[in-house]
Image (spheres, rainbow, N blue to C red):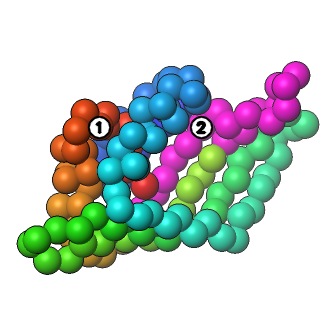
Protein backbone atom coordinates (compact mmCIF):
# COMPACT_ATOMS: atom_id res chain seq x y z
CA UNK A 1 0.00 0.00 0.00
CA UNK A 2 1.05 3.61 -0.37
CA UNK A 3 1.25 5.63 2.86
CA UNK A 4 1.44 9.38 2.20
CA UNK A 5 1.95 11.75 5.15
CA UNK A 6 3.50 14.49 2.99
CA UNK A 7 0.74 17.10 3.55
CA UNK A 8 1.29 18.80 6.89
CA UNK A 9 3.67 16.21 8.32
CA UNK A 10 6.60 16.43 5.90
CA UNK A 11 7.01 12.69 5.45
CA UNK A 12 7.33 11.51 1.85
CA UNK A 13 4.97 8.92 0.44
CA UNK A 14 6.24 5.38 0.81
CA UNK A 15 5.11 1.92 -0.25
CA UNK A 16 4.88 -0.90 2.30
CA UNK A 17 2.64 -3.84 3.14
CA UNK A 18 -0.40 -2.82 5.20
CA UNK A 19 0.67 -5.16 8.02
CA UNK A 20 4.08 -3.44 8.15
CA UNK A 21 2.44 -0.03 8.47
CA UNK A 22 0.25 -1.23 11.35
CA UNK A 23 3.26 -2.86 13.04
CA UNK A 24 5.28 0.38 12.75
CA UNK A 25 2.47 2.70 13.81
CA UNK A 26 0.91 0.79 16.72
CA UNK A 27 3.85 1.13 19.17
CA UNK A 28 4.02 4.90 18.64
CA UNK A 29 0.29 5.33 19.06
CA UNK A 30 0.56 3.37 22.31
CA UNK A 31 2.93 6.04 23.70
CA UNK A 32 0.02 8.48 23.89
CA UNK A 33 -2.08 8.38 27.06
CA UNK A 34 -5.16 8.58 24.84
CA UNK A 35 -6.14 9.16 21.22
CA UNK A 36 -9.49 9.66 19.56
CA UNK A 37 -10.03 9.70 15.80
CA UNK A 38 -13.52 10.78 14.78
CA UNK A 39 -14.08 9.95 11.11
CA UNK A 40 -17.29 11.27 9.55
CA UNK A 41 -19.06 12.04 6.28
CA UNK A 42 -17.51 9.16 4.35
CA UNK A 43 -17.98 9.47 0.59
CA UNK A 44 -17.06 6.40 -1.44
CA UNK A 45 -16.58 6.50 -5.18
CA UNK A 46 -15.93 3.45 -7.35
CA UNK A 47 -13.53 3.19 -10.25
CA UNK A 48 -14.90 0.12 -11.96
CA UNK A 49 -15.90 -2.85 -9.86
CA UNK A 50 -12.58 -3.51 -8.16
CA UNK A 51 -11.26 -0.11 -7.03
CA UNK A 52 -12.71 2.51 -4.71
CA UNK A 53 -11.72 5.74 -2.99
CA UNK A 54 -13.12 6.92 0.34
CA UNK A 55 -12.79 10.56 1.40
CA UNK A 56 -13.82 11.35 4.98
CA UNK A 57 -13.43 14.16 7.49
CA UNK A 58 -11.23 13.43 10.52
CA UNK A 59 -10.65 15.03 13.89
CA UNK A 60 -7.73 13.24 15.51
CA UNK A 61 -6.97 14.08 19.14
CA UNK A 62 -3.71 12.97 20.75
CA UNK A 63 -3.10 13.27 24.51
CA UNK A 64 0.33 13.01 26.12
CA UNK A 65 0.79 14.73 29.51
CA UNK A 66 3.54 17.36 29.57
CA UNK A 67 5.03 19.43 32.36
CA UNK A 68 5.39 22.29 29.86
CA UNK A 69 1.70 23.05 29.39
CA UNK A 70 -0.90 21.79 26.94
CA UNK A 71 -0.95 17.99 26.72
CA UNK A 72 -3.09 17.69 23.58
CA UNK A 73 -2.68 18.10 19.87
CA UNK A 74 -5.67 17.93 17.58
CA UNK A 75 -5.50 17.50 13.82
CA UNK A 76 -8.50 18.48 11.67
CA UNK A 77 -8.73 17.50 8.01
CA UNK A 78 -9.61 14.57 5.82
CA UNK A 79 -8.46 11.11 4.91
CA UNK A 80 -8.31 9.94 1.31
CA UNK A 81 -8.05 6.16 1.35
CA UNK A 82 -7.93 3.91 -1.69
CA UNK A 83 -9.13 0.32 -1.76
CA UNK A 84 -8.83 -2.63 -4.12
CA UNK A 85 -10.98 -5.76 -4.27
CA UNK A 86 -8.91 -8.94 -3.97
CA UNK A 87 -9.94 -12.63 -3.88
CA UNK A 88 -9.84 -12.25 -0.08
CA UNK A 89 -12.11 -9.19 -0.07
CA UNK A 90 -11.55 -5.42 -0.06
CA UNK A 91 -8.07 -4.28 1.03
CA UNK A 92 -6.64 -0.82 1.59
CA UNK A 93 -4.15 0.20 -1.10
CA UNK A 94 -3.49 3.81 -0.12
CA UNK A 95 -3.71 6.08 2.92
CA UNK A 96 -3.36 9.87 2.74
CA UNK A 97 -4.29 12.20 5.59
CA UNK A 98 -4.59 15.87 4.63
CA UNK A 99 -4.58 18.16 7.67
CA UNK A 100 -6.38 21.47 7.23
CA UNK A 101 -5.39 22.89 10.62
CA UNK A 102 -3.89 21.73 13.90
CA UNK A 103 -4.28 23.03 17.44
CA UNK A 104 -2.60 22.44 20.77
CA UNK A 105 0.93 21.49 21.74
CA UNK A 106 3.05 20.89 18.66
CA UNK A 107 5.59 19.09 20.89
CA UNK A 108 3.19 16.18 21.52
CA UNK A 109 4.12 14.31 18.33
CA UNK A 110 7.92 14.67 18.73
CA UNK A 111 7.56 13.51 22.35
CA UNK A 112 5.64 10.43 21.22
CA UNK A 113 8.24 9.72 18.53
CA UNK A 114 11.02 9.99 21.11
CA UNK A 115 9.38 7.46 23.44
CA UNK A 116 11.18 4.18 23.95
CA UNK A 117 12.02 2.74 20.55
CA UNK A 118 8.93 4.08 18.86
CA UNK A 119 9.30 4.01 15.06
CA UNK A 120 8.24 6.95 12.92
CA UNK A 121 5.63 5.91 10.37
CA UNK A 122 3.36 8.91 10.07
CA UNK A 123 1.22 10.80 12.50
CA UNK A 124 -2.56 11.31 12.24
On whether residue 115 falls in the magenta region, the answer is: no
Residue 15 image offset from top left, x and y in percent: 49, 25
Which quarter of the figure is the C terminus placed in?
Answer: bottom left
Q: Where 104 falls versus 94 (above or below)?
A: below
Q: Nearer the viewer, mark 1 or mark 2?
A: 1
- In the picture shown, does residue 87 fall above or below 77? above
Left or right? Give the position of 107 relative to 64: left
Q: Residue at x 72, y 38 (%)?
A: 83
Residue drawn at point x = 73 percent, y = 34 percent = 91
Helix, strand or loop at mark 1:
loop
Residue 62, percent from left and from top: 37, 65
Which residues are drawn in magenta? Answer: 82-99
Question: For residue 1, which quarter of the picture?
Answer: top right
Q: Is residue 19 left or right of residue 83?
A: left
Query: Can the viewer see residue 84 in this picture?
Result: yes
Residue 109 lies left or right of residue 88; in this view the side is left
Characterize the magenta stretch by its predominant secondary structure.
Answer: strand
Q: Provide the residue designation for mark 2.
A: 94
Q: Which residue is mark 1?
A: 118
Amino acid sequence: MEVDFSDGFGRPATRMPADAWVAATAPRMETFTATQHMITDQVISFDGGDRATCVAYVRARHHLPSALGDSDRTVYGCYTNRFVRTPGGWRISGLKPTPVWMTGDFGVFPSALAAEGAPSAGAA
